[in-house]
């Protein structure tokens, strides 16, 4: 697969030529660093390499200045105050700090936490850990469109609820949760509100005041910034406290110790500013590409289903299930494009996506789902190539599929007595 | 998932894809697996008057190794007697295709498909619904 050919250059020096790579349509997994962002980061790896915590010389001062400028950039992107921004190694750490840190600090008030069944694993696994520590967690169900209703969310709240955590934009299906209503509910009841806005920043407006968020996780590498940097927003008014999870030096006002990675921070700051600046033009272009992809596939293939609400959704994500073809063979057939699948086919288990299951999808449809993630560098030509590939490969797999044949014969597959094995 | 070249070859160029009419004389159909488990194999054999499997067809809903296992089996059963076909073991299929350990169940399913197809053929012959004209 990754065979590298050596080509003789004009000057006689061999040049490395990578074999043609698949079309990248996995922008919800990660994004490349924008060249403008990279350019800002580079000086902080070499010339301005100082430790921002060094107070006694210019190396430290210039690094500190860069860190504070980036803090302002991130704060501006979410309508926060720079003193509310805490640097972390990524959004997973930010979410761990938000949930564990606040649950530990406020455990005297109550031990109940509310979240959604379709949260990111960073939230779900952290909640599992808190359950092991004696907290109680309610996982609120979502509708078949992936959205939670504020009513069912309100019904899960109890007098001893201290914290709630909701994913603004779902990473698998791109749906936008009604956070303003939820934020209002929580503020009225004085329950802390953590928002995972990792997939929202740069795609839709993110405003901590409008959402009434108390804590918010952000990530650098989902917004064309570097990996290994994230942010936890911690509200100052009314003041929210979190117990540190990492100790040693008292950086970030004691909430997160460790030498600050100046270049990563500069990258996250620049990427945040760029994300907000290019949000509207990106979204407009990406929506056109998404529609082209959706109509191209749906116009030529039957029995294709959109997972998650199509209206209340960022256009950057299109999650489709292809009935009567199996997930792993679908991924094999689509090796010309880099996408994610709802099927955990790389592992021994046949565990389909828990997000699609929470939407009430049958296992077969969860297995045969593909997440197309469209981004800043996706071209119309790439979308057209993808449509043609998907249509021809799915048709080929269906010709191979006895289930497709039965479907065409009008047999209801649910009525068939399948042999167990 | 690192597949062998043989699996990829069968996956990309599957042999004997298709169906026989179930009403046709001498046809046995075996369908095994379940959609919820991620694999359904349908193997059909066509048996001639001498009790020899003269042709085979398959359709499979499943992963690359499930498709490859069933494609391989259609090649192997052709020209064999029913007893010879029934003696094909999943371990032979797994060995031929160099299946990774997590995909051994695909070869088991292919062996089951042969048994189911032969049983179906024999059941039809007994009740005479589509008996082969073997003159006995």
Image (cartoon, coloured by chain):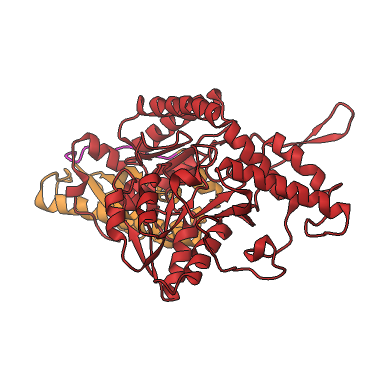
Chain colours: A red, B orange
Q: Which region of the structure is painted magenta? A: B14-24
Q: Nearer the viewer, residue A409 or A378?
A: A378
Q: Is residue B48 magenta?
A: no
Which secondary structure dominates the residues rendered in magenta? loop
Q: Residue furthest front?
A: A237
Q: Looking at the picture, does residue A33 appear above or below residue B125? A: above
Q: Nearer the viewer, residue A34 or A215?
A: A215
Name the residue: 43% across, 68% down. A128
Residue in the picture at 10% in, 48% down: B128
* Residue A330 placement, left or right of A243: left
**For residue A274, what is the image quadrant?**
top right
Expressed as whole percent of the image width and height from the top left, the position of residue A203 reads 51, 37
- B35 vs A284, left or right, is left
Q: Is residue A292 above or below residue A230?
A: above
**Looking at this view, is B14 or A416 the one in front?**
A416
Q: Quadrant of residue A136?
A: bottom left
Visible residue check, residue B54: yes
Quarter the C terminus of chain A occupies: bottom left
Q: Is residue A360 visible?
A: no
Asked whether, in this view, residue A262 is left or right of residue B4, the answer is: right
Residue A272, x across and y down, in percent: 62, 41
Residue B15: say if magenta.
yes
Q: Nearer the viewer, residue A33 or A209?
A: A209
Relative image position of residue A419 (x, y in whole percent): 24, 57
Indicate the position of residue A271 as horizontal and vertical percent values: 64, 40
Q: Quadrant of the N terminus of chain A?
A: top right
- In this rendering, the count of numbered labels is 0
């Amino acid at each position: 697969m990754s065979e590298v050919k050596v080509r003789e250059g004009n000057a006689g020096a061999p040049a490395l030529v990578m074999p043609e790579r698949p079309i990248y349509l996995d922008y919800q997994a990660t994004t490349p660093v924008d060249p403008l962002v990279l350019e800002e980061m580079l000086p902080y790896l070499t010339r301005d390499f100082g430790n921002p915590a060094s107070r006694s010389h210019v190396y430290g001062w210039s690094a500190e200045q860069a860190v504070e400028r980036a803090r302002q950039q991130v704060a501006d992107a979410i309508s926060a105050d720079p003193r509310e921004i805490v640097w972390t190694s990524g959004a997973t750490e930010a979410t761990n700090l938000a949930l564990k840190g606040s649950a530990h600090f406020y455990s005297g008030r109550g031990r109940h936490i509310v979240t959604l069944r379709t949260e990111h694993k960073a939230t779900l696994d952290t909640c599992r850990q808190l359950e092991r520590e004696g907290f109680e967690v309610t996982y609120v169900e979502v509708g078949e469109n992936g959205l939670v209703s504020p009513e069912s969310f309100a019904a899960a709240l109890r007098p001893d609820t201290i914290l709630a955590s909701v994913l603004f934009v779902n990473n698998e299906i791109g749906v936008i949760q009604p956070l303003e209503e939820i934020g209002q509910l929580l503020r009225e009841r004085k329950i802390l509100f953590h928002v995972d806005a990792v997939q929202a920043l740069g795609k839709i407006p993110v405003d901590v005041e409008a959402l009434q968020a108390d804590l918010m996780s952000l990530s650098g590498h989902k917004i064309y910034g570097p990996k290994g940097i994230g942010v936890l927003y911690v509200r100052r008014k009314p003041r929210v406290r979190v117990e540190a999870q990492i100790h040693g030096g008292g950086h970030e006002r004691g909430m997160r110790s460790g030498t600050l990675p100046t270049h990563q921070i500069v990258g996250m700051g620049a990427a945040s500013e760029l994300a907000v600046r290019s949000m509207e033009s990106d979204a407009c272009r990406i929506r056109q590409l998404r529609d082209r992809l959706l109509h191209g596939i749906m116009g030529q293939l039957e029995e294709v289903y959109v997972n998650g609400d199509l209206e209340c959704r960022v256009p950057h994500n299109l999650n489709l299930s292809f009935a009567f073809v199996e997930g792993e063979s679908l991924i094999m057939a689509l090796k010309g494009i880099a996408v994610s699948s709802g099927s955990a086919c790389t592992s021994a288990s046949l565990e389909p996506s828990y997000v699609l299951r929470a939407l009430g999808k049958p296992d077969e449809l969860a297995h045969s789902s593909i997440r197309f993630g469209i981004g800043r560098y996706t071209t119309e030509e790439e979308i057209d190539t993808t449509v043609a590939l998907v249509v021809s490969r799915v048709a080929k797999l269906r010709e191979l599929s006895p289930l497709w044949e039965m479907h065409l014969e009008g047999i209801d597959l649910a009525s068939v007595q399948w042999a167990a094995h | 998932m690192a597949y062998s070249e043989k699996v990829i070859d069968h996956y990309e160029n599957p042999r004997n894809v298709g169906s026989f009419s179930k009403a046709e004389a001498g046809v046995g159909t075996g369908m095994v697996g379940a959609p919820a488990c991620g694999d359904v194999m349908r193997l059909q054999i066509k048996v001639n008057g001498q009790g020899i499997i003269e042709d085979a067809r398959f359709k499979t809903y499943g992963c690359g190794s499930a498709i490859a296992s069933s494609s391989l089996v259609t090649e192997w059963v052709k020209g064999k007697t029913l007893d010879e076909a029934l003696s094909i073991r999943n371990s032979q299929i797994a060995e031929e295709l160099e299946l990774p350990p997590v995909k051994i169940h695909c070869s088991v399913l292919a062996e089951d498909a042969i048994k189911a197809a032969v049983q179906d053929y024999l059941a039809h012959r007994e009740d005479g619904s589509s008996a082969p004209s073997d003159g006995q």
